[in-house]
Image (cartoon, rainbow, N blue to C red):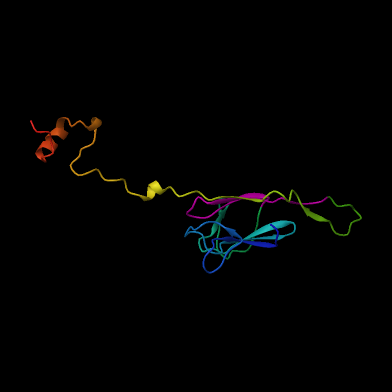
Amino acid sequence: MRRAAVTIGRNSSQGSVDVHMGHSSFISRRHLELAFRAPHFYLRCLGKNGVFVDGAFQRRDAPALQLPPQCTLRFPSTVIKIQFTSLYRREKVNEEASSPPLRPLYPQISPLKIHIPEPDLRSLVSPLPSPTGTISGNGGKVEGKTQECAAHAGLGEKS
């Protein structure tokens, strides 16, 4: 994070967020806010569906939650997750120093890993219907009761 607070959600015609999580209707335009107040990160849930932090539900407008150094955020009714890792640490303080110097640890490493799964389009589409007048099974051969049904329906082989 390069700012004191970052907004996570989905971009829309009404505005954009700092971290766009895709176009899921289960993710609010402004769903989460991550804020840094030394030496901790805090999460505020702004989305109507809430969010899970390491499996514990955090509701909308609840008091800001102090995040552990590593945790998983998951948007309800989705498999979309954020792996959060704090890379911040305090330098060791000398007894003489009036205030401890602060610096990020490994600033070149991104503290968030975001996984947005691609939708499985096969689950959204009905299977193609069989062509009219065909019967499947046994490599296209019609046998037994199926033969009787096909003959009765006028689809069977003619003798």
Tell me: 73 left or right of 89.
left
Q: Is residue 90 magenta?
A: yes
**Residue nearest the viewer, comparing 112 with 60:** 112
Q: Residue furthest right?
A: 96
* Residue 79 horizontal/vertical position (percent): 50, 50
Q: Is residue 89 magenta?
A: yes
Q: Quadrant of residue 36?
A: bottom right
Quarter of the rendering occupied by the N terminus: bottom right
Vertical relation: 125 (above or below) 147: below
Quarter of the rendering occupied by the C terminus: top left
* Residue 91 horizontal/vertical position (percent): 82, 51
Tell me: 33 left or right of 147.
right
* Residue 73 horizontal/vertical position (percent): 58, 53
**Residue nearest the viewer, comparing 8 with 96:** 8
Please report the residue visible at 89 percent of the width from the left and 52 percent of the height from the top: 94
Q: Which residues are magenta?
A: 68-91
Q: Residue furthest left?
A: 159
* Residue 2 horizontal/vertical position (percent): 70, 59
Q: Residue furthest bottom?
A: 14
Task: Count the marks.
Answer: 0
Q: Quadrant of residue 154?
A: top left
Please report the residue visible at 54 percent of the width from the left and 62 percent of the height from the top: 11
**Residue nearest the viewer, comparing 107 with 51:** 107
